[in-house]
Image (tube, rainbow, N blue to C red):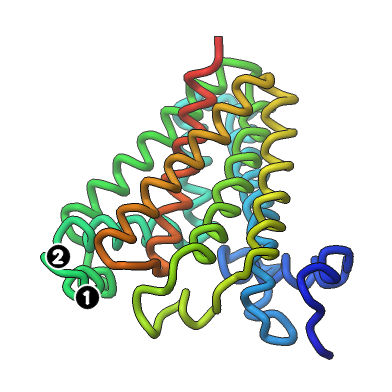
């Protein structure tokens, strides 16, 4: 079956279902994902990344809620939630963050940085980056839980999951691949319409959820903070390696999600 163009596919529910299953298959280890879109159009399927993000966020928030209801402390519940999220993705984004930190921090040239990023061994920069990222996520969840309990944690994790993965699509469409092989090069480049669809979907879902739970100011600040984090990672990638990789996309997801959570925590009364 020929693939529809981005405009027609926007209104095709069956395509959204197929693309959502692909996004879940790529970004998570959840059993209801699929390995590839049925017609092999990986780039168009990226528009469903925010859907994978909101599913992951909802499940992560549910883990937090269950832990709280079982009588565990907020710290333990937050730790279980973050650990569960890492398990559900197979540490996919954390691995990208670690490789990005090792490569951009350790290589003297672009070629050396890319070589380090491809190395499966974990360096000091990468280890520190993942430790800090995990601590910030746990700390932010604890702070936010004081405002409305576990219900708001479910909301904020779903929102940050959707928006951070929409920003991954923005990155993949705004910078060229830094190498001719690898995951990002093989998946193709999303065009402007795909990027707009991902940003609209992720932004609307994240905005509505956060504004409904935390108010207009907190919601807008969180969206903006996450976008600034994306811009910073994008600028570093462009400066150091002249493009993007799958690891850089993972770093964008982690940085923007953490910025989103921290902004919500800071904006609360």
Residue 241 at least partly seen: yes
* Residue farthest to the front, as pictured: 192
Q: Is residue 262 left or right of residue 134?
A: right
* Residue 260 position in % (x across, y down): 51, 35
Q: Is residue 210 left or right of residue 28?
A: right
Q: Residue at x 39, y 66 (%)?
A: 244
Name which of mark 2 and mark 1 comes first in the sequence.
2
Q: Residue at x 55, y 78 (%)?
A: 188
* Residue 52 position in % (x across, y down): 65, 57
Per the image, label 2 sits on a secondary structure element best described as loop
Relative height, residue 78 to residue 251 (above, below): above
> Label 1 neighbourhood size at 10 Å, few (<14), some (14-19), many (20+)?
few
In depth, the one of 159 and 8 nearer the eye is 8
Q: Is residue 200 left or right of residue 258?
A: right
Relative height, residue 125 to residue 23 (above, below): above
- Mark number displayed over residue 197: none
Residue 24 at least partly seen: no
Would you name the residue on which mark 1 appears? 115
Q: Residue at x 68, y 72 (%)?
A: 44
The N terminus sits in image quarter? bottom right
Would you name the residue on which mark 2 appears? 107
* Residue 57 position in % (x across, y down): 62, 45
The C terminus sits in image quarter? top right
Q: Residue at x 44, y 65 (%)?
A: 175
User: How much space separates mark 2 and mark 1, taking CA atoms?
Assistant: 8 Å
> Label 2 neighbourhood size at 10 Å, few (<14), some (14-19), many (20+)?
some
């Amino acid at each position: 079956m020929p693939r529809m163009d981005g405009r027609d596919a926007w209104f095709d529910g069956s395509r959204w279902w197929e693309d959502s299953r692909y996004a879940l298959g790529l970004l998570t280890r959840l059993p209801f994902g699929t390995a590839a879109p049925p017609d092999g159009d990986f780039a168009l399927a990226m528009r469903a990344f925010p859907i994978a993000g909101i599913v992951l966020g909802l499940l992560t928030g549910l883990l937090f809620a269950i832990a709280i209801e079982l009588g565990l402390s907020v710290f333990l519940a937050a730790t279980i939630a973050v650990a569960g999220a890492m398990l559900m993705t197979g540490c996919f984004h954390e691995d990208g963050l670690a490789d990005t930190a090792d490569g951009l921090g350790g290589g003297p040239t672009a070629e050396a940085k890319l070589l380090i990023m491809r190395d499966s061994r974990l360096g000091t920069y990468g280890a520190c980056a993942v430790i800090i990222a995990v601590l910030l996520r746990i700390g932010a969840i604890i702070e936010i839980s004081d405002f409305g309990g576990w219900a708001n944690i479910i909301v904020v994790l779903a929102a940050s999951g959707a928006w951070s993965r929409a920003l991954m699509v923005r990155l993949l469409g705004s910078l060229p691949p830094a190498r001719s092989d690898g995951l990002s090069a093989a998946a193709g480049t999303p065009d402007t319409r795909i990027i707009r669809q991902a940003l609209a979907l992720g932004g609307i879902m994240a905005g509505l959820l956060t504004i409904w739970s935390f108010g207009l100011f907190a919601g807008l600040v969180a969206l903006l903070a996450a976008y600034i984090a994306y811009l910073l990672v994008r600028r570093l990638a462009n400066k150091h390696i002249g493009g993007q990789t799958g690891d850089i996309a993972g770093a964008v997801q982690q940085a923007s999600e953490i910025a989103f959570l921290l902004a919500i925590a800071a904006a609360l009364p």
